[in-house]
Image (tube, rainbow, N blue to C red):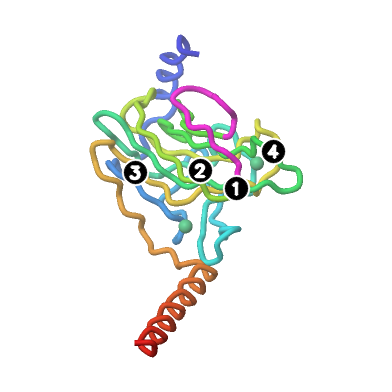
């Protein structure tokens, strides 16, 4: 694999020149509370293998899901992100098994690419020890947060890419991503674009907590 990389890079440069109109930035953040306007599909075409969906665990939150399995990426950042040295990535991942899922390898994958995809490098996925550096994503049925500072093996200006990997087998609709931050490691993490509504359940718990505090204060005053 290592010996083949220079050839792959050369062919990708010939076949996939930088897209006209795409910006080059040092930070990128996405919470999927708006549209997919910051993203593009395979080959720069329409996005058909990924979509904004409701968070299956938190009503009111929206996340990235996948109506189709993919390989080589299903959705790519429209902009390029550049760094003079290392990159830092952080994101939330949910692997939520359903009938037909391949337990322990639901298929969530994150990587960087030179185009859509062109030469690319996988950074995180549900296959164990896929490459290095690599984050093993765990399908725990709850949201897990991952972060990594790493050196790109495909150059200093990259796109982001995500998919539900067809090679993992199983089914669609069992992997989700949210709250993606990707930036030059020398810069602070960028803010997310939107405020996410507090889940209804948590809001009720918070309200109940406030009422309990108020009641105890009233009781304390009465006792005093
Ligand atoms: Ca979100
Ligand atoms: Ca899957």
* Quadrant of the picture in which ligand 2 is shown: top right
Q: Residue at x 42, y 30 (%)?
A: 16
Determine contact: label 1, label 2, CB under 8 Å: no
- The residue mark sitting in front, 2 or 3, is 2
Residue 186 found in image quarter: top left
Task: Determine which of the numbered discs, if any, sits on residue 103 in the image.
Answer: 4
The disc, 4 or 2, on the residue closer to the chain's N-terminal end is 2
Task: Determine which of the numbered discs, if any, sits on residue 205 in the image.
Answer: none
Which residue is label 3 attached to? 22
The number of numbered badges drawn on the structure is 4
The disc, 3 or 4, on the residue closer to the chain's N-terminal end is 3
Label 3's element?
loop
The disc, 2 or 3, on the residue closer to the chain's N-terminal end is 3
Q: Nearer the viewer, residue 157 or 173?
A: 173
- Estimate the x, y position of residue 115 in percent, counting from the top left: 43, 33
- Estimate the x, y position of residue 157 in percent, counting from the top left: 32, 32
Crowding around mark 1 (Cα neighbors within 10 Å: few <14, some 14 to 19, many 20+) is many
Which residue is label 1 attached to? 66
Query: Of helix, strand and loop, which mostly describes the magenta segment?
Result: loop
- The residue mark sitting in front, 4 or 2, is 4
Determine contact: label 3, label 4, CB under 8 Å: no
* Vertical arrangement, residue 187 with respect to residue 72, above or below: below
The disc, 1 or 2, on the residue closer to the chain's N-terminal end is 1
Calculate the distance from the C-alpha at mark 1 to the C-alpha at mark 2. 9 Å
């Amino acid at each position: 694999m290592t010996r083949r990389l220079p050839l792959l890079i050369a062919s990708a440069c010939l076949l996939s020149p930088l897209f006209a109109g795409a910006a080059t930035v040092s930070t990128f953040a996405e919470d999927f509370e708006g549209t997919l306007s910051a993203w593009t599909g395979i080959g720069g075409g329409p996005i058909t293998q990924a979509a904004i969906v409701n968070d299956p665990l938190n009503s009111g939150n929206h996340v990235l899901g996948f109506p189709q399995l993919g390989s080589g990426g299903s959705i790519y950042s429209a902009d390029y992100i550049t760094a003079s040295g290392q990159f830092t990535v952080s994101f939330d991942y949910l692997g939520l098994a359903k009938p037909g899922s391949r337990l322990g390898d639901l298929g969530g994958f994150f990587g960087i690419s030179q185009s859509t995809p062109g030469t690319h490098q996988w950074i995180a996925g549900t296959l164990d020890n896929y490459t290095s550096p690599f984050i093993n994503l765990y399908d725990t049925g709850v949201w897990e947060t991952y972060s990594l500072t790493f050196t790109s093996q495909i150059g200093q200006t990259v796109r982001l890419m995500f998919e539900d990997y067809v090679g993992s087998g199983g089914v669609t609709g069992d992997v989700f991503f949210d709250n993606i931050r990707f930036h030059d490691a020398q810069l602070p993490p960028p803010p997310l674009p939107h405020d996410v509504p507090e889940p209804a359940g948590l809001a009720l718990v918070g309200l109940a907590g406030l009422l309990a505090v108020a009641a105890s204060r009233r009781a304390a005053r009465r006792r005093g």
